[in-house]
Image (spheres, coloured by chain):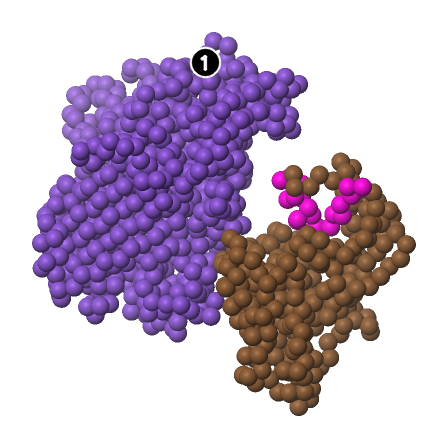
Chain colours: A purple, B brown
Amino acid sequence: MNDMTQSNLERALKIVGTRPARPDGVDKVTGRALFGSDKSLPNMLVGRVLRSPYAHAKIISIDTSKAEALNGVKAVITCADFEDFPSEFVPNGEMVVNLKDITRNIMAREKALYVGHTVAAVAATSDEIAEKALGLIDIKYEVLPHVLEVEDAERPDAPLLHEDMITIGVEPAPKKASNVAKRVEFGFGDVEKGFAEADLIVEREFTTQQVHQGYIEPHACLASVSEDGQADLWCTTQGAFVVRNFCSKLLGLSAAQIRVTASEIGGGFGGKTVVYLEPLALALSRKSCRPVKMDMSRAEVFTSSGPTSGAKIWVKIGVKNDGRITAGDCVLKYQAGAFQGAPVGPGAMCAFAPYDLENVRAVGYDIVVNRPKVAAYRAPGGPISEYGVESVLDEIAIKLKIDPIEIRLKNAAKEGTIAPYGPKLGPIGMIETLEAAKAHPHYSAPLGPNQGRGVASGFWFNIGGETSSSITINEDGTVGLTLGTTDIGGSRASMAMMASEELGVPMDLIKPVIGDTNSLGFNFLTGGSRATFSTGMTVVRSTREAIEELRKRAALLWEVDLDQVEWVDGHARLIAGDEPKTMSLAQIAKQAGKTGGPIMANCSMNVTGAGPSLGTHIVDVEVDTETGKVSIVRYTAIQDAGKAIHPAYVEGQMQGGAVQGIGWALNEEYIYNDKGQLENAGFLDYRIPVCSDVPMIDTVIVEVPNPNHPYGVRGVGETPIIPPLAAISNAVSRATNIRFNELPLSPPKVLARLMHG
Amino acid sequence: MEYVTPKSASEASQALSQEGAFALAGGTDLLVKLKTRFVSPSVVVDIKHIPNIMTIKQSAEGWWIGAATPCAEIVEHDSLSKNWPGVVEALSLIGSTQIQGRATLGGNLCNASPAADSIPALIAAGATCVISGQTKEREEPVEKIVTAPGMTTLGKGEFIIGFKLPIPKNRSGDAYLRLIPRSEMDIAVVGAGVSLSLSEDGKIEAIRVALGAIAPTQVLLSGLEDIFIGKEPNDDAIQKLVSLAEKACKPINDKRGTIEYRTKIAGVLAKRAFGIALKRANNY
């Protein structure tokens, strides 16, 4: 029998590692692909949301009677249409969620906690009527003082967002409620002893601002609930099954009553792992018995979806004169937004993870403020904490006159290193990416005037999780793959490639589709860089099972024992016998009816053994010393992919992560006024990079295989957003001889430092 | 909402004098305001069907640029670009490639944004605009149009039909620079337009400098004559230009920049635009 777990690491590969066109490419470039708001149904209503104008306010009363009376309005909902839940934390990828908070975030209950917080929603026969109806909803608020920054929120006299919130993770538990939801700590050894042994200690404080994922496609969905409670939901999401489970709980429906179909997705980056409009559309549809379509404007995406935390962090590192780190310590204070759940846990876990340390400590605080509740954003928490550590390390390298790559090599984590968050690391590529960076021509290229070169590394865990997929052998010899993880970065291509490699048939005979929630067992969402790793694992296993079945059918047709049949290059081959006999996949498939019926296989598993991915980035910047404007002159991203199934899409992830990091480092920030209103809820003044802001991002894929995957795959999507923040800050610091410790490095901020030091 | 397409200037003036009437040229500002419900016109008057409003012409008296000519057409006009490179580079910065196909000089001026890119360059160039009204046509320098953000001196039923620019003398040059945090598709934090001409012996005969986004309206710098006229430009004069530019600033602190930053940048951009204009004048 075929070994379902057999490794292909030593095998010569024909398909894996090549760069075929993606199966979904033509639909996307011709405009056929259907995204979140592209679907319509007969008798469909338009759903619109009424949002809080206040950053913090008690809701005294809501009167919807005038809106309900308006001709054309078919349903109005408020928190009264959703049941309440006790506080209970449930893991959701790299984040943790709580139903008590989710139901309050999708629809405010006792209080509105940020400007843009949903307080009511309507469904009407036209957009105009829906808008008019929103104006007829009468809400009485008692406006409360608000708080936006962590240093203000943790003061004893700060306005409390949740009057019953007692900090978790502090012993003994505090008696008084506060805005500090949670304290976490990771590490080992004795940092004080380590600092005592150090020849040089550098400690710095850093500030980063709240940033948004900036996906181009706004949230959108279409819900249809029938009179007997059967619900169909079409939406843009990173995980249809996760949406189904959230919605079934929030609406009191069973999982079988809701079928969720994920549309094509116009970017998510973690932001489409939670629900906003979906439960509202379902509730409105249930109430009106008509399909309801909802979508967010760009401004709503900014004010009312889930950006990531702004933070205040403190980092202290001690080193010997030779650059060897004796101790690393940090304190991270992350904004959670209106409900707890800042990614400070993963931030603390990965802060020092690229390094092999004896004494390390990372303390994190999850602090609620009157901003939208944060959601995952590509390596949630990682870019912030590692920005601090990588900046301090650069300052140390300068002070010790050590090359920044050398100091990292001296301390690099490797196979067998105990990670600061506990486990012993398997094979990882920190040293390999640093060596590749050192050898890259970029690293030794001359710099021009006012230019500086920065280097930084990044570590990300990656995850596995519950995954299910199936394969069908069609009667004409073509192959169908049904996958349950949203294709965000080309996973349909990589799944078809792995199946093609296993089966030995050309990739264009394989059609991969993303199934709805009724077509497969539960799939956790696409996040944690898990799709190519986890879904790939199930595809390889189910394909091997299908091959096993194909051999059986051939053995039946040849009337020989199964062990007489082997599978080679898409054909069954008779091992013994007078003359060589083969039968193609198509020939076997054609006769499937008389050998036992259709051939298909599936694989469901809770995938473990994800391999961390390390990256090192090199960036050259030029600083206009009269205006403070920073330009990215040259950029090289180096990363360990384990194995690049489709190298072009791995490079795309590396480039995309670098570009998002460039935006985070240079210009992106949520700007609030004194009323707690977001001043830049649009792409004009929330400046993600445009094409001309970035040079071609050069990439180098390093391959240190993950032994837990048949092809050696690690996740690649998240790591590349980690190094850019520090790499750019280090480059600007080196170009100007001024140490920068605040993001973004926007022209006014850089010029202020150049003028005033 | 009514939509009309008058075929003559007087017809357009008639339509525009109605209550709640808005002029539509390229629509790149009006459509955004419509969609965000910032304005709700009773009648939209599409002025693009009026003769000469979308043409570029050169005559002995100078250049005519129709107020509704798309920026993309102006940018592709070779001899106008050779004559007024600063004006053309300023209007080429408005919006994106797609917006350039619709955006117009008349619209950029009448939208009356303090940060409009074309206005400082047009003021520096000494451009005038021809205003059509119900009873008469009048001509005004561009700097006389904007009075405050979103406000102009145009009266009821009046609209701009075109712009006039002189044919530059030998040894003239102009330039426009803006500072944006990105590299394109952004709004000026500060803009600076400079136009100057030199005598045969390299002395400055005429100079105009206008700044944008540093006050409620664009500012035409005064006091340049004493510093520059009849003299060869030197570092001391340029330093005085920087001080004059900084002093002219009455900016605000907002999401796009601080008072300190805008003031400092006004001087830097005036100096740099002067340098480019001077180089162009020496080569023209």
Task: Count neighbours of disc 1 (C-alpha within 10 A) and say few if under 14, some if 14 to 19, many if 20 or more.
Answer: some
- In the image as oriented, which residue stretches furthest toward the bottom? B201
Residue at the (20%, 36%) spot, across then down: A170
- In the image as oriented, which residue stretches furthest toward the top? A228
In which quarter of the view is residue B55 placed? bottom right
In which quarter of the view is residue B166 placed? bottom right
- In the visual, does B104 lie left or right of A458? right
Question: In this figure, what is the number of numbered marks?
Answer: 1
Q: Quadrant of the N terminus of chain B?
A: top right
Residue at the (49%, 24%) spot, across then down: A60
Q: Is residue B60 above or below residue A165?
A: below
Q: Which residue is mark 1?
A: A230
Whether the magenta-drawn stretch holds residue A345 is answered as no
Secondary structure beneath dot 1 equals: loop
Instruction: Write the start and end of the magenta stretch as one range.
Output: B19-36
Q: Nearer the viewer, residue A133 or A265?
A: A133
Q: Chain letter for mark 1, please.
A: A
Q: Is residue A319 above or below residue A664?
A: below
- In the image as oriented, which residue stretches furthest toward the right? B135
Q: Quadrant of the C terminus of chain B?
A: bottom right
Relative image position of residue A146 (x, y in whole percent): 43, 39
Relative image position of residue A6 (x, y in whole percent): 17, 35
Residue at the (70%, 80%) spot, across then down: B206
Relative image position of residue A213 (x, y in whole percent): 42, 43
- In the visual, does A26 lie left or right of A156? right
